[in-house]
Image (cartoon, rainbow, N blue to C red):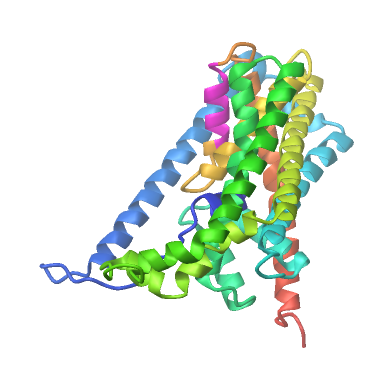
Amino acid sequence: MSDERDAMSQPVGTSTTTITAAGGKPRSVGRFALRAAVQVAGFLLSLGLLYWCVRQAFGNPAVADKLPKLLETPWWLIAAMLLCSVVTTIISGLVFWRVLVPIRRLSLVNTVAVNGVSTVLGYLPFKLSLIFRVLYHRRVDKVELAVMGGWFAAVAAIIIIAVSAPGFASGLRPQLDGWWWVIVAAGLIGGVVATLIAARLMVRFRGRAIAWLAGNSAAPKPGMIAAIARSDTATKLSDAVVMLADWRVLTVAMGLRVLDLGVQALRFYFASEAAHLAGIIDAAMPVEQCIVAGGLYFTLQAIAPTGVTGVREGGTVGLLKLLPGFMADGSFAAVVLVVSATEAIANVAWGGVCGAWLWWVNGRGRG
């Protein structure tokens, strides 16, 4: 979902000062043009990855001939995939809401709705999902930008812990056995405990650190860092450690993230069952492959810099083709495309409901 991308690519604090270059053109205009060009180029590359993924599925006649049979997928299986997509979006919204609670308690329903709209915008470039999230929480909820920087950083830390544990376990134990689960559990518990200890230590000493950066304990330190430290921005940015220092935030948010990864894996199982019923593959994907595919799919959407379209599909198919045991004849590409197609339908529908709700609760749909 786009919320993961928002957290992983959030702007903690940016200056809006315009600097004039020697030629008379503001440098900020040049930076904007460069960033826009990068976003457009990245989005076109992502579309190319999506096209490559589609070609993988349609390039094999044995697979392509059976793709139309996917339209005969039982309604309950389609409903299960659509429900999984909505559930994973709701879970992500719950994570955002819970993480901010130690600093500010927002409306739970509205925060989940904001995430639903952001998820739809995440398909597009120019970080529109992040822009919408920031604008809404700033203008409606009056959350300060510096606080949002710390908030998104805390969410990103939880994402990193959640995806690192199964990724590390899969690197050590490609087969899903008892030791794989032990490694994952140890990684999650260890990550939570280490984060909790580090956050509480930083909370304890953050006042001294900010004072040192501001130059209060020595000669004044020039530069932007000292200027930020002398303002209240540094304290608000460091609220991220306050959020992570709350064991309830960490345990609940981590539990939700683990549940989200489980839903991602379940979605791949349902999609592979649909492919199996269509005759594309001989049997539904094993549990371990669903977990690996779902985790990679989730990770790619979290780090995609120019929209999730194509990055997840091409990346998941391309990377997992390198692993032994995964289907390399285009059939796995068909499974991934089923996941993405049902997700897109669910996200657009859910995003529309969330957008209508936000429009109504903010008084624009009344009278």
User: Which residues fall within the magenta stretch?
Assistant: 312-322
Can residue 76 be seen here? The reply is yes
Snapshot quadrant of residue 350: bottom right
Q: Is residue 321 positioned above or below 346 on the image? A: above
Give the left or right position of residue 53, taking residue 113 as reference. left
Task: List x then y, in percent, for residue 325.
Answer: 64, 12
Queried whether the magenta region covers residue 5, the answer comes back as no
Main SS type for the magenta part? helix
| Lateral position of residue 40 relative to residue 221, left or right | right
Residue 349 appears anywhere in the view: no
In this image, 122 relative to 216: left or right? right
Could you tell me residue 80's position as x and y percent? 83, 39
Side of 223 where 66 appears, left or right: right
User: In which quadrant will I find the C terminus?
Assistant: bottom right
Residue 134, located in which quarter of the rendered image? bottom right
Task: Return the residue nearer the eye: 129 or 196.
Answer: 196
All told, the count of numbered labels is 0
Residue 335, percent across and down? 68, 27
- Name the residue nearer the viewer: 299 or 276: 299
Q: Please tell me which residue is depicted at 61% across the width and 61% down the height of the picture.
A: 242
**Residue at position x 50%, y 62% in the image:** 206
